[in-house]
Image (cartoon, rainbow, N blue to C red):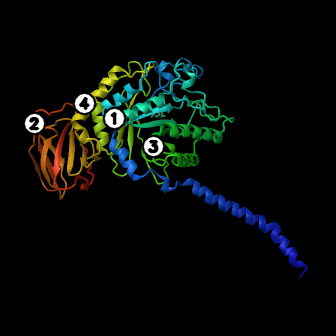
Amino acid sequence: MSFALPKIRGYFLGVLRPLEVGFSIIFFSFISFTQAQKLDPAIKTSQAVMDGFMNKRFGMFIHFGPISLRGTEISWSRNKDVAAEEYDNLYKEFNPVLFNADAWAETAKEAGMKYLTITAKHHDGFCLWPSSVSGYNIMNSPFKRDIVGELGQACRRQGIAFCIYFTVLDWHDPDYPIHNPYDSTQNVQGDMKRFVATMKNELKEIITRYKPYMLWFDGNWEKPWTTEYAIDVYQYIKSLDKDVIINNRLGKGDQNSLSMESVGDYLTPEQRIGTLNMKDPWESCITICNQWAWKPNDSLKSLRECIQTLVKTAAGNGNLLFNVGPMMDGRMEARQVARLKEMGNWLSNYGNSIYGTKGGPYTPNQIYASTRKGNLIYLHVFQKTGAVLELPSFAGIKITKAYFMNGKELSFTQDSGKDIRINLPVVLPDMVSSVIVLELDKSAELIPVMNNQN
Ligand code: H79
């Protein structure tokens, strides 16, 4: 027996130990894996910061880069309308000498926009700031000026929150495994770990130099990007600035949803008005013409469409990031600037019905949409379908007065829990969206959302 014991011990040491070690490796890697899958809720952008962002309601998106020399779409025309070799050399001629950061920021201000987001780096990889991480940047163009920095300062002078677009893919960087969106074969020479390290260094430059209010990520759908990278980058950004707002495209998955697992603070429906959502913050990005980057003679949206897009966005409880693509000489197109000023004029009359409001209680439809604040409902009427505007009523809350914003009082009836009937004049006072204010005897925010499709 005394002889057998060490043998048994040896058996245990020789066989069970490695098993035990193996189990603990599996166990601990499981723990760190599950931890890595979740973002610490404590570092998420605070509710107060998000409320401040959502109160702004209207921002300017700017897509700009060397591709404005061709007038085709930014990044997506590489390997399509423009050969990659030609596209990648456009920066050598990129010289937007009429770029004036104050003019851009003033245009945003005059449009009634409260924030501005510039494509510091789109999928083509070109950096609009003098990066010491990537040589493919504005300092190696003939222009040699820090477009991002100048614009950031101009926005601060105008009281506009300055935000930065940055994509998580880069078809130009050899470390990134995909170089052509139309052929997603992954290059074995790619090195995502090194690519993400580079990305973090670029983000550090951006955050410490330009102090962006919000970072607008994109490009999350390509295969090399993973949730682990997204969580790592979110944590890294928050370690540099805990208040910077981050859109949901840093994480993988659907741009139109926000789950507990999402990496990012708000939803980003693209080229469509988001659906009414009283719970999750959201921002629609929509172009003033069709293309994101400048295109000669692109079709410009009518004032009516522009205003109604903004109204329906606010009425759905979301923000509108409205995109302009400046021309190769650095100016914004005069007709687009004129349209933006028209929006600003409308907002100078009706801004109280947009900024700082909540969406609902009515679901936006073709005829009307609503926003609310305190004991007021702002009813936006797009078209007249008869002498009387009928709306579903709400229980337990009375309308005490109805009037056109900045205008005449209106007669109405309210059947308890059934219909509201507002008598309209022969002609509505505003061609694009007339605003009727309904004063209530209680807070409008108590009213549940109504499904009033026509
Ligand atoms: O920066 C703008 C777009 O370039 C970017 N997001 C906004 C803010 C964006 N990246 N990807 N997408 C939008 C989705 C791409 C869709 C399309 Fe296509 C690109 C449609 C046509 C070109 C993919 C490639 C589908 C067809 C070809």
Q: Disc 2 and disc 3: Cα gap in Å?
A: 42 Å
Q: Pick whichever of labels 2 and 4 is earlier in the sequence.
A: 4
Residue 376 circle label = none
Residue 432, visible in the rendered structure: yes
The residue carrying mark 3 is 255
The reply to whether callout 4 and callout 1 are in contact (CB within 8 Å) is: no
Q: 4 left or right of 268?
A: right
The residue carrying mark 4 is 345
Q: Which is more foreground, mark 2 or mark 1?
A: 1
Q: Residue, x 10% and y 36% (percent of image)?
A: 425
Name the amino acid, label 2: Pro
Residue 113 circle label = 1
The residue carrying pointer 3 sits among few (fewer than 14), some (14 to 19) or many (20 or more) residues within 10 Å by Cα, namely many
Residue 425 circle label = 2
Helix, strand or loop status at disc 2: loop
Q: Disc 2 and disc 4: Cα gap in Å?
A: 23 Å
Q: Which is more foreground, mark 2 or mark 4?
A: 4
Vertically, is 26 above or below 143? below
Q: Pick whichever of labels 2 and 3 is earlier in the sequence.
A: 3
Picture coordinates of residue 65, whole percent (x, y): 49, 25
Depth order, front residue of 142/396: 142
